[in-house]
Amino acid sequence: MTRANKTDAQPKGMKKPGGSAKKKNFDSDGFWKDLIERFFYNLLKRAMPELYEKADRSVPPRFLDKEFRDILNTGDPAIHSSPHFADFVLEVPLKNGDAEWVILHIEAQGRGGSNLAVRMYTYKSLIFAHYQREPAALVIITDKRPSKEPDYYSYSQYGTESLYKYNALVLWELDNEELLASDNPVDLVLYAAKFALERKGEHQKFNFLRETVKLLNGRGWNLQEKRDLLLFIERAVNIRDKVLITQYRKFLKQENKEGKAMYIPLILRDSAAEIEQRGIAKGVLKGKKEGKKEGIKEGKKEGKLEMVRNLLGNGIPPEVVAKSAGLSLRQIQRLTQ
C-alpha cells in the first residue's frame, strides 16, 4: 500500500490554494488527465508497483467510460456533479489473463472540498453494486487537503465495521533527488509538476526548463518519449514572459544545431497538422481550375513542404524532421531544393 496522505503537510514555500494565480499558472485537470492517458503504466510503476509487475504492459489499459456512466445512472443529483466523479475507471490486463479494475482520481487545486475518503468509498461501492468488482484505487493529491481530514474511510456501528484504504500519490511528499535519479520517464514530469506548485518566478521557470532539457538530452529514452515529456514539462512550468519564451526557443534551436537535442521543441506554437491544413487550403485554391480533388492533393504537398521548412528553420536536424514528417532524408532534401 502506497503511503497515504499526511493531511497537514505542505510543500515548502507553497501558498495556500484559493487564489486565481494558480488557475492561470497550471491547467491541472487537463495536465493530469493527458499524462495518465500517455504514461499510465509509468505512473503505475511509481504509485502501485505491485500491480505494475503483474500487469500485461504489452496491452494498453481499457478506459471504462461507459461502465462508469452506467453506475452513475441514479436519481441522486448530487452524484452527477463535481466532485462526485472519479476521473478514470480503467481495466488493467494482467499477465495471468485476468484483469484488474482501477479507480484513478485526481484531487487537484483543493476543488473537491472535504470528505475525500467518503467519495472514494462511494465510487468503490457503486462499482461493486453494479458489477460485483472490487477495484483497486489510486488518488493523486496535488494540493493541500483540509486539516485533520482522514486518509481512509472507516465505519463502526453495533458490531458492523468497514475499513477502506486506497493508494495515494501525494505530490509534495515525493523526494526531488529520487525523482531526478529515476529511470522512469513519468518521474521527471512529477518533478516538474511539483516545481509548478511552488509558484516560482519567470526567470526561475526559464532556468528550470533549460536544466530539464539538458537532463532529457542525457537520458536513453526514445525520441517520441522525449518529445512528449518536454510537452508535459513545458505545460507544467508554463513560462508566460514573452522575452523569456523567445530566449527559450533560441536555446532549443541552438541545442538542436549542436546535435544535443534529438527531438522537436514542442513549445513551437504551429503544429505540423495545423501547417498542413493551411497548405491544403492553399492548394485547393491553387488547383481550383483542375478540380477540388487535385487541389487537396496539391495542398497536402504544399502543407508538407511548409512544415518541413518551418522545422528546419527552427534548427531541427534534418534526420529528426524526416522522422517526424514520415519522409526519407533524400525526400527532405528534394522538398527544400
Image (cartoon, grey):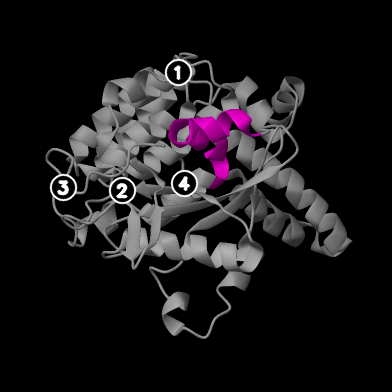
Callout 2: SS: loop
Please tell me whether mark 3 or mark 2 is closer to you in this view: 3
Q: Which residue is mark 3?
A: 8
The answer to whether 30 appears left or right of 283 in the picture is: left
Residue 270 in sight in this render: no
Label disc, if present, on residue 46 of the rendered structure: none
Callout 1: SS: helix
**Considering only vertical position in the picture, is 66 above or below 148?**
below
Which residue is painted at 45% across and 76% down in the image?
79
Q: Which residue is mark 4?
A: 269
Q: Which residue is mark 1?
A: 217
Image location of residue 97, percent across then percent down? 75, 38
What's drawn in magenta, residue-wise?
Answer: 37-55
Specify the quadrant that holds the N terminus: top left
Task: Quote the CA–CA distance across marks 3 and 2.
Answer: 13 Å
Would you say the residues marked 3 and 4 are in contact, meaning their CB atoms lie under 8 Å apart?
A: no
Q: Main secondary structure of the magenta part?
A: helix
| Circle 4: residue type | Arg
The one of 321 and 236 positioned closer to us in this rendering: 236
Q: Which residue is mark 2?
A: 142
Residue 47 in sight in this render: yes
Task: Quote the CA–CA distance across marks 4 and 2.
Answer: 28 Å
Q: Earlier in the sequence, mark 1 or mark 4?
A: 1
Which residue is painted at 38% across and 47% down in the image?
140
